[in-house]
Each structure stands twice: as structure tokens, then as C-alpha cells.
Image: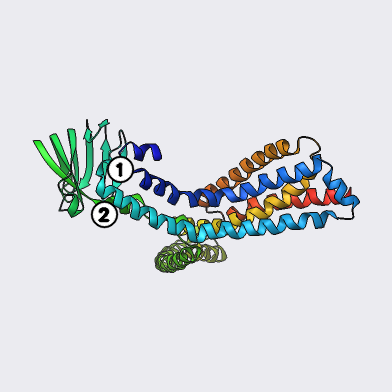
């Protein structure tokens, strides 16, 4: 990001601030893995230097040796939760505000070669960019009547004159435009021009660029959104249930009427079977339908809670594994830490994907990696205590 922003002549201080406001989302995800690798390297070094053996000979039990590591993992758990719940939402707001200020002073920041930009109802596809000039540009938007419009120009250049009004203006050369009316699909309008000025509102850029999602919201805000979406979803289910119930009764009554009227079908379907058929149709109102938006928020809510507690699960696993390291404690500990980190991230990513695609329980999707790591740690811990 620094390279891209600095190439547009943005002051170094503002670039450093943009990077600083981007760090909380990275740090919050790094702390659990840091706890794992740090515990493995520290305990592994203790074990390889025979310091664990010396402490046990002095009367220090394994559980007592484990207690300060657990306490420190709880501190990291709290820190990770604070990063997710406070610093990420705050940094997102600060990032958006600063980026907006930078964009007002240097609108060329949005000109990237061979990129696709989404601005509210507009989509802008750019070709090669040289300074403030674009070799080819494609714009897909809607006109004043909400009709879909496609604008193609051979060249475009940035106009700075309207920045005080919060507008980025592009001067387009050799323009061709095609518009399809919504009501009459078989007709279309088009025009061509040597020059055209196209305006983009800066507020549309910043809103589209950094619209806060569930990850950039606090746990309380995400929970409030979940409750609101559940209420809206329940209304949809109630409406659907009434429609399905009424249609089911119509079909069932018509089917039962045919059975009663046509005596030749009586031997094929008895009345108890007709009753079962009607009951099955009525039970269709209980068929579960899902709201993808609600599922995303529930997955993110559980992730905000499960990821901090990964610090504790990692330490429970790291302590017994570190005790098994006899040589090159720090090197082996680092290698094992990287391996476990990759496995955990894979399980977390798989859980989030399955939770979204097949609507697996959000709690199970996000907490199962912690349970697996914690169970493995308890197993190795018990084996170590029995030795």
C-alpha cells in the first residue's frame, strides 16, 4: 500500500498514518499465533537446557511451571479481544477520514492501471495509467432515469477544477455511449462525442471504498445487527409459511377430492395414506430457509469471540510439546509453531467457508479449531504428567 500511495506524491506522514490505521486488523490476528510460537520457543529452550529438570528437582511441579504461561495467555486473550472490539472499528473510521482528506488533495490516488473500481452505482474499468492520463476507460452506470448506461472512451484525463465542490472530473476523448431503457428492452439509445466530462462524487468513493462490515464493527454492534436481521428474517419466514400453508392445503384438498371421486384409485391409496400426504405438505412450512447476510454476521460474531481464546488453546498445546523438545529448542519450537499455525488457519478458513456455503452452525464453525487444539493439548499434557 505504501508503494502505491507514495507513487502518487502523497506526503510521507500521511502514508505512515494510513499504514498505522491498517495495523490493528493485522495485529489482532497475529497475537494468538505469537502466543503459540513464543510459548513453544520458550518452553523448548527450557527443556533443551535441562532447566525444566532442574526446577522439578527443586520441587517446582509441572503445573506450577505452567501457571505463569497460562496467565500471560489470558492477557493476550484480553488484548486480542480489545483489538477486535475497539481498535479495529476505531482505526477503520480514522483510515476512512484520512483517506478522504488525502483524496481531496490528490485525486490521482484513485487512478490505478488495469483496475476495476466500484463507486455506489458506477463501475469504472481503467486501462494503462500514466500520471493523470488513462489510455482506455470503460464506465458502467445509470442515467437520471435509472437506465443502464455504458460509456467507452479511448482516453481520459483528470480535471482538478471541481475538487472544492467534492467532485472528481474526468475529461473523456472519443466517447461512445450506449443506454438500454428499463421498460423497453428491445430499444436502446446511443451517442458518440469527441469530448465529454464525467463527474464522480468524492463521498461516493470513500463510502464504497471503506464501508464498515461486521469485521470492522464492535462485538456489541455486530450483535445488534444480528438481532435486527433475525427480526427481519422472521418476518420473511412468517410470510413464507402462510403462503406455503395455504398452497399446501389447496393441493392436498384437491388431491383428496380426486381420490374420493375416482373409485378406481381407491385400491392404490388408502385414506390413512391421504392423511399422511396432507401432513407432509403441512410440514413443509417448517422447512428451514437461510439468510446469507445473517449467517455472515453470526460467523463474524463467533469469530470475534473464538479468535482471542485461541491464545489459551495454543498455550495449552505449546507447553507439553515444548517439554518434548530436547535439542535446538527454539528452532524446533519455531518450526512446530509455524506448522500448527498453518493447520489452525486452514481449519478456521474451512469452518468459515463451510459455515457460509452449507450453513453449518456458526458456533461450531468458528470454535471447532479451538476445541481441537485444546483437546490435543490436554492429551499431550496428560501423557507428559504420567511420565
Whether residue 141 sits left or right of residue 220 in the image: it is left
Examine the image and state in which quarter residue 234 appears.
Answer: bottom left
Marks counted in the figure total 2
Residue at point 76%, 35% (across, down): 328
Pointer 1 residue: 117
Question: Are the two marked residues, 2 and 1, in contact with CB atoms closer than 8 angstroms?
Answer: no
Q: Quadrant of the N terminus?
A: top left
Q: Is residue 194 above or below residue 143?
A: above
Pointer 2 residue: 203
| Label 2 packing within 10 angstroms: few (<14), some (14-19), many (20+) | some
- For this rendering, which residue is in front, 114 or 17? 17
Measured as percent of width and height from the top left, residue 347 is found at 61, 46
Residue at point 22%, 41% (across, down): 139
In terms of sequence position, does the residue under pointer 2 or pointer 1 come before the other?
1
Label number found at residue 267: none
- For this rendering, which residue is in front, 155 or 193? 155
Q: Secondary structure at mark 2?
A: helix
CA–CA distance between discs 2 and 1? 14 Å
Tell me if I can see residue 230 in this picture: yes
Whether residue 52 sits left or right of residue 98 in the image: it is right
Examine the image and state in which quarter residue 185 appears.
Answer: top left
Measured as percent of width and height from the top left, residue 356 is found at 50, 51
Q: Is residue 2 above or below residue 65?
A: above
Q: Secondary structure at mark 1?
A: strand
Which is closer to the viewer, label 2 or label 1? 2
Whether residue 147 sits left or right of residue 381 in the image: it is left
Measured as percent of width and height from the top left, residue 291 is found at 45, 58
Amino acid at each position: 500500500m505504501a508503494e502505491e500511495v507514495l507513487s502518487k506524491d502523497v506526503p510521507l506522514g500521511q502514508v505512515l498514518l494510513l499504514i498505522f490505521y491498517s495495523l490493528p486488523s493485522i495485529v489482532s490476528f497475529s497475537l494468538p499465533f505469537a502466543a503459540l510460537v513464543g510459548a513453544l520457543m520458550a518452553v523448548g529452550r527450557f527443556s533443551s537446557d535441562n532447566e525444566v529438570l532442574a526446577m522439578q528437582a527443586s520441587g517446582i511441579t509441572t503445573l506450577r511451571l505452567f501457571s505463569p504461561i497460562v496467565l500471560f495467555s489470558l492477557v493476550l486473550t484480553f488484548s486480542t479481544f480489545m483489538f477486535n472490539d475497539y481498535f479495529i472499528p476505531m482505526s477503520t473510521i480514522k483510515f476512512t477520514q484520512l483517506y478522504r482528506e488525502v483524496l481531496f488533495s490528490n485525486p490521482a490516488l484513485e487512478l490505478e492501471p488495469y483496475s476495476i473500481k466500484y463507486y455506489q452505482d458506477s463501475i469504472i474499468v481503467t486501462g494503462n495509467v500514466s500520471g493523470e492520463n488513462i489510455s482506455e476507460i470503460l464506465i458502467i452506470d445509470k442515467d437520471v432515469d435509472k437506465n443502464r448506461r455504458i460509456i467507452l472512451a479511448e482516453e481520459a484525463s483528470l480535471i482538478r477544477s471541481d475538487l472544492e465542490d467534492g467532485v472528481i472530473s474526468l475529461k473523456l476523448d472519443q466517447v461512445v455511449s450506449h443506454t438500454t431503457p428499463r421498460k423497453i428492452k428491445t430499444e436502446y439509445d446511443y451517442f458518440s462525442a469527441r469530448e465529454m466530462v464525467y463527474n464522480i462524487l468524492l463521498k461516493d468513493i470513500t463510502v464504497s471504498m471503506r464501508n464498515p462490515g461486521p469485521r470492522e464493527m464492535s462485538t456489541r454492534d455486530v450483535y445488534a445487527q444480528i438481532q435486527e436481521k433475525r427480526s427481519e428474517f422472521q418476518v420473511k419466514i412468517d410470510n413464507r409459511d402462510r403462503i406455503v400453508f395455504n398452497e399446501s392445503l389447496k393441493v392436498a384438498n384437491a388431491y383428496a377430492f380426486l381420490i374420493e371421486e375416482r373409485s378406481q384409485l381407491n385400491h392404490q391409496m388408502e385414506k390413512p395414506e391421504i392423511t399422511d400426504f396432507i401432513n407432509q405438505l403441512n410440514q413443509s412450512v417448517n422447512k428451514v430457509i437461510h439468510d446469507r447476510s445473517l449467517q455472515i454476521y453470526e460467523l463474524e460474531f463467533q469469530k470475534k469471540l473464538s479468535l482471542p481464546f485461541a491464545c489459551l488453546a495454543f498455550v495449552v498445546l505449546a507447553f507439553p510439546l515444548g517439554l518434548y523438545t530436547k535439542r535446538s529448542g527454539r528452532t524446533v519450537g519455531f518450526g512446530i509453531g509455524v506448522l500448527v499455525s498453518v493447520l489452525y488457519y486452514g481449519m478456521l478458513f474451512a469452518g468459515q467457508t463451510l459455515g457460509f456455503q452449507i450453513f453449518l452452525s456458526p458456533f461450531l464453525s468458528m470454535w471447532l479449531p479451538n476445541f481441537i487444539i485444546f483437546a490435543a493439548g490436554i492429551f499431550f499434557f496428560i501423557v507428559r504428567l504420567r511420565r
